[in-house]
Amino acid sequence: MNKKKIDMDMGSKMLITHAPHIWRGFSISRIMYIVVIALIFPAAAAVYFFGYWSLVLIAVCIAATVLTEYVIKKLRHKRFVMDGSAVITGLLFALVLPPRLPIWMAVTGAVFSIAVVKEAFGGLGYNIFNPALAGRAFLSVCFPREMTTWVLPSYFNPDAVTGPSPLGESFIAQGDKLTLYRDLLFGNTSGSMGETSALLILAGGIILLLFRIIDWRIPVFYLGTVAIGSLLAGDDIIFQLLAGGLMIGAFFMATDYATSPVVGNGRIIFAVGLGVLTVLFRNFGPMPEGVCFSILIMNAFTPLIDKYIKPKPFGYQGKKKNA
Amino acid sequence: MAVLIKKKSKFRGLHLPENKITSKKPIEPLQLPEKIILPLIQNIGAPCSFIVEKGDMVETGQKIADSSAYVSSPIHSSVSGKVKKISKIMNPATSRLMDAVTIESDGQDRWAGIEKVFNINLTQDYRRLKSIIDSLKKEDMLAAIREAGIVGLGGAAFPTHVKLKPPPEKKIDTIILNGCECEPFITSDHRVLLEYGRQVLMGLYIISRTLDPKDIFIAIEDNKRDAITHIKDLIFEIGFDDIFKIVSLPSRYPMGAEKTLIKTVVGRAVPMGGLPMDVGVVVNNVTTAKAIYEALIEGKPLIDKVITVTGEFENPKNVLARIGTPVRELIDLCGINDERTNKVIIGGPMMGNTLVELDFPVTKGVNCVLARDSRIPDEQNCINCGSCVRICPMDLMPLVYVRTVKSGRSDGLSDHYIENCIECGSCAYVCPANIPIVGYIKTGKAMLAKQKSDK
C-alpha cells in the first residue's frame, strides 16, 4: 500500500487562524442585497405612479451615495467594500424624496447622508442616525418649499400636477372612505416616491421577514402603537396606518441594525417609542409628517436602551458582588 | 421501566452541517508509533514533573510524570523504550511553550507488570462484575482512577478523581454521561458507544458507585440512532434498566456543552461562575467511563485514545492511537489531500486549534485531527445585527466584548459576564461581518487576568 508522505511546508501554505473554522455564510452583502430586492417593490410603485423620472432620481441618488462613500473611504485610507450598504442608503433616500425634487438638491442630500451621517461617525455600523432619513431631514431644513411640493400620480405622463399629500392640511379626499383607503393601499396618491403604495411596501416587508432580515417586533409594535394611539386620539386608524411614510419607515427605516437596539425587548421599547412620537407629531406637531423625526429621535435613544435592556445571562444569581 | 426518553430542548442552538463522514468506520488500532512525545501539561490543573530522566528505559504503562497538587493527574508512557530527550513544544491552544519528553519506542510494547486485575469475560460475567464493583471502597476506586491518569476525555481534560469527589456540602443526585458529540466531523464517542458499549456502561456503574446518585442519564444526540439502540439493548442485557436512562437529545450545537446539557436534561441552570456540582450534577464523557472500566477492572492506565482523523484525507477513519503519537503519523496513515488542505486542526471545526507543527502529539485532550480548506472572508465592521446575541447559549452579548476589546479597554467586560463564555464559537459562526469574536473574547479574558495579577 503506498502511503503518501507529505512534507508540509508550514510557512508557505498552512493557515493559522482562530476557531471557529466554519462559517454560516450569511454575509453582510447577502443581507444588503435581499433588502435591495425587497425595495424593488416600492421602487416599482414609484416608477408606475410618478413616471420614468423616478428612475432617474433613484439612479442619481444611488450613484451619489456610492461615489461619496468611495471618495471618503479613499480619503480616510480605508478599504472600500461594495457591500450594498451605500446602495441601500441611496435607494431608500430617493424613495423618501418628493418625486420632482430638483436633481442637485437630491445629490446634496445624498452626499450629506453618506459623508456626514454615516462616514463621519465611523462608517458602517458606527452611525447613530439613519443616513437616509437624516439626509431627508437635512433637505427639509435647507429647502423646505421644494421638500413639501408634492405631485399627484401622473403615471407615465412626464408632466405632473402638484397637489397636497394625504397628511397635509389642505388635502380633501375625493370620493368616499373606501376609495381613499384603496388609493392609499395601492399608492394612487401623492407623497414621496416610495411611500405611497402601502401594499408594495408590505410585500417588500414580508420578504424581509421571511428571510429573517428584520425583527418582526419593530414593525408590529410600531404600527400597533400608532393604531392604538390613533384610536385614543380619535383619528381614522386605517388612514393613519396607510398614509405618509409610516409603512416604509416601519419596515425599512426603523429596522436598520446599526440604529436600532440589539436585544428583542429593547426593540419593542424602541418601536413603542416610535409609535408614541409619531402619533404626537401627527396630532400636535407643526409638520404634517412625524415618522422621519420620530425615527431620528429614537435612534438617539438606542444606545441608552441597549445599556439597560440586556439578556439575563445563563445561571444569573443576582447582582454581582465585587470580587 | 422507561429507559429511553426523548427530550425536546428549549434551547434552539445552531444547526451545523454534520460531516460525520467517519461514523460508520470501525475503530482501527494503530501500529506502535516510532516515538511518542508526552507534554507535561495534558489536563486542567497543575502540570506534572518528570520522574524519569534522559536515557532511562521505560515500559508501557509506567508512570513517567506526576504532581503532588490535588488537581493533577499522572502521565504514563504509552510505549516501551528509551527516553530520548526532554524539550519544549508549543501548545496550539495557548501558544505557550511546554515541557515534553520524547520516548523512542523499542517496538516491543512491554507492559509494566500489569496483569488483568480481575479475570472477567465481559459478555457473560455481569453479575460477578457488578458484585466486584459493589465491593470496592470509594477511596480505593478514586485512588485507582487517579493512579491510572484518567482525566475527562471529552476534551476538557479535568482530573476525573477530583470531579468524582466533590466537597461534602455538595450533594450529588444526578449523573449525566455525555455521549452528545455535538461538533461536526468528530465521531470518536459515537464509535466508542457502538464498539465499547459494555465497557462504557460498566464504567458508568463504577462512577455511580463513587457518588450514590438518584438518577443516571446517558445523553446521546439523536443523529446517533444506532448508538442509542445499541446502548438500550445493552442496558437490558446487562440488567441496568432500573438505574440507567437514555436521553435522546436534538442534534444542535453546543448540545454537549456541560451547562446547556444539564439545563436540557434536568432543567437546572448551573449558576454563573459555578460548577455542575453546585446544582447536584456530575457530567462525564462516555470515553472517560470506558477508561475508568479499563483502569479498575483491567488494570490499564490511560495510554491510548480513540481519535477521529477526518476531513480532506483519502481514508478518513477512527483510530485507537497511543497517547503521544505525533499527528504526522496519523496524517501519513490516512493520506492527506494536500491540494485541498490549508489547515490542520486539533479538535473540531468549532473549537479546535490550528496546528503550527505536525509533530504535535496526541494528548489526553485530543479527540480529532481535521484537515480542511477553510478560508473565511476578512473581518468587517460590526453592523449591530444582534445575531451573536440571539445565538449565544450562555445568553451573553458578544458584540459588546468585541467593541470593548477593540477600543483597548477591559472595563465593562466583567460587568457583561465575560467569564461565563464557554468559547463555543456559535457567535463567530453566525456573524455576517466575519468578526473573529472568540479571538476577541480570549483577548478580553487575558486582559482581565492580567489586570487581576497586576493588582
Image (cartoon, coloured by chain):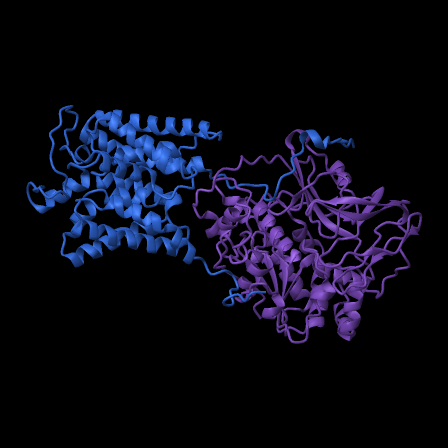
Q: In the visual, does A264 lie left or right of A1?
A: left
Please state which of residues A30 and A254 is positioned toward the viewer in this rendering. Answer: A254
Q: Is B444 rendered above or below residue A245?
A: below
Q: Is A317 rendered above or below residue B392?
A: below
Please state which of residues A113 and B138 is positioned toward the viewer in this rendering. Answer: A113
Give coordinates of residue B82: x percent, y percent. 91, 47
Rendered hue of chain A is blue
Q: In the visual, does B366 lie left or right of A208?
A: right
What residue do we see at 19% from left, 27% from top?
A51
Give coordinates of residue B365: x percent, y percent. 71, 52
The image shows a total of numbered marks equal to 0
Which residue appears farthest toward the left when viewing the image? A175
Q: In the visual, does B278 lie left or right of A30?
A: right
- Rendered purple, the chain in question is B
> Residue B205 lies in what quarter of the image?
bottom right
Give coordinates of residue A261: x percent, y percent. 39, 50
Q: In the visual, does A318 lie left or right of B136?
A: left
Q: Quadrant of the C terminus of chain B?
A: bottom right
Give coordinates of residue B426: x percent, y percent. 54, 48
Q: Is residue B13 visible?
A: yes
> Residue A129 lies in what quarter of the image?
top left
Which residue appears farthest toward the front when viewing the image? B455
Q: Quadrant of the N terminus of chain B?
A: bottom right
Please state which of residues B64 and A63 is positioned toward the viewer in this rendering. Answer: A63
